[in-house]
Image: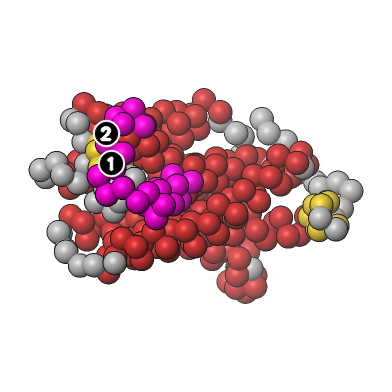
Amino acid sequence: MPQLFIAIEILILGGLSIIGCSFVIYCYWKFNVLRTDQLKIVIHIIIFDLIQQILLFSSAVAFLVIDNQEFKLSDYPIICYGQAALLQYSLLASTAWTTLIANNLYRTVKYGDRTYRKMVYSMIGFLFPLIMSLLPFAFDAYGVSAAFPMSMCSFNSNKPKIRYFILVFQDVPIWSTFVYNAIIFTLVIKELYDHLGSKCLAENKQIFLLFLYPFLVAVCWGMPAMINQFKVDATVWPIISFGFGSLIGLLDSYLYCYLSLVRSVKWVGFSLELKIESIEMSPLK
């Protein structure tokens, strides 16, 4: 029953996330004028969220569709290990790019520096997650997932003390991201308070949405990670974990992109069009 419930919630919530991420990517691809320096960073988060949600969604569909109880994805090692590594990579890459958004925002507010540092951002956003997703192979840490043993591969739930591998390769990077983002966003709001004053800051409530993403990362991935380390065996926690995890793509799309896209595009029949002729934006450097 818990597996069936998890599969259904992934189909519903993950489906919404896939729609949200796809919409943002489509707008980014169609309208060149919307490709601001900030959205250029955000789109990486959305793309990796989409990859992650597609993997979870397909695993849930396979679990519901496959009627052969003897089928195991682990019997196809290339597919199994590929899925596990890609799931790990997309999760870490998505969270890593949030630190780059925080850093970029802080440098903009503090120093007026909007430079897109392609080499540095690529190393943090692509290379570090790649290393952290390949290292588990050295310890044979990938394998069948406890959620869907038939149709999903992640960290091997059958491996002794697997939680320590999850702690090192997944939980510590996620919690580090949460702490870093929370500190940086606090500094951003402090800078804005010093320049704008409390009244103006209070009128721009959207600024406080900056705190939501670190909170979401903690709730969606950090809390289940901590519970996993304490070996709390309760049916409700996997349901909560996969529920929040399936929502992260939709929440990212809304928090980072929805408001700006709503101001910029409109539906004309069955087609999206720009609301204005041109949009003033800062050039990428």
As drawn, the residue found furthest toward the left would be 160
| Residue at 45% in and 31% down | 126
Q: Is residue 215 left or right of residue 201?
A: left
The answer to whether residue 21 of the structure is visible from this angle is: yes
Kindly identify the amino acid type of the residue bearing the numbered disc 2. Answer: Asp
Residue closer to the observer: 279 or 126: 126
Residue 72 colored magenta? yes
Quadrant of the rendered structure where residue 133 is? top left
- Residue annotated with mark 2: 75
- Residue annotated with mark 1: 72
Q: Is residue 93 left or right of residue 24?
A: left
Q: Which residues are magenta?
A: 54-79
Q: Secondary structure at mark 1?
A: loop
Residue 46 colored magenta? no
| Residue at 31% in and 31% down | 76
For residue 277, the mark is none
| Residue at 81% in and 47% down | 279
SS majority, magenta: helix
Q: Position of residue 50 (x, y in %)?
A: 52, 46
Instruction: Please tell me how crowded label 1 is: few (under 14), some (14-19), or many (20+) other residues with Cα within 10 Å.
Output: some
Q: Is residue 36 above or below residue 190?
A: above
Q: Position of residue 150 (x, y in %)?
A: 29, 46
Label 2 close to label 1 by CB (< 8 Å): yes
| Residue at 77% in and 42% down | 31
As drawn, the residue found furthest toward the front would be 68
Residues at marks 2 and 1, CA–CA distance in whole angstroms: 6 Å
Quadrant of the rendered structure where residue 73 is? top left
The answer to whether residue 210 of the structure is visible from this angle is: no
Q: Is residue 13 above or below residue 45?
A: below
Instruction: Please tell me how crowded label 2 is: few (under 14), some (14-19), or many (20+) other residues with Cα within 10 Å.
Output: few
Residue closer to the observer: 199 or 237: 237
Q: Position of residue 270 (x, y in %)?
A: 81, 55
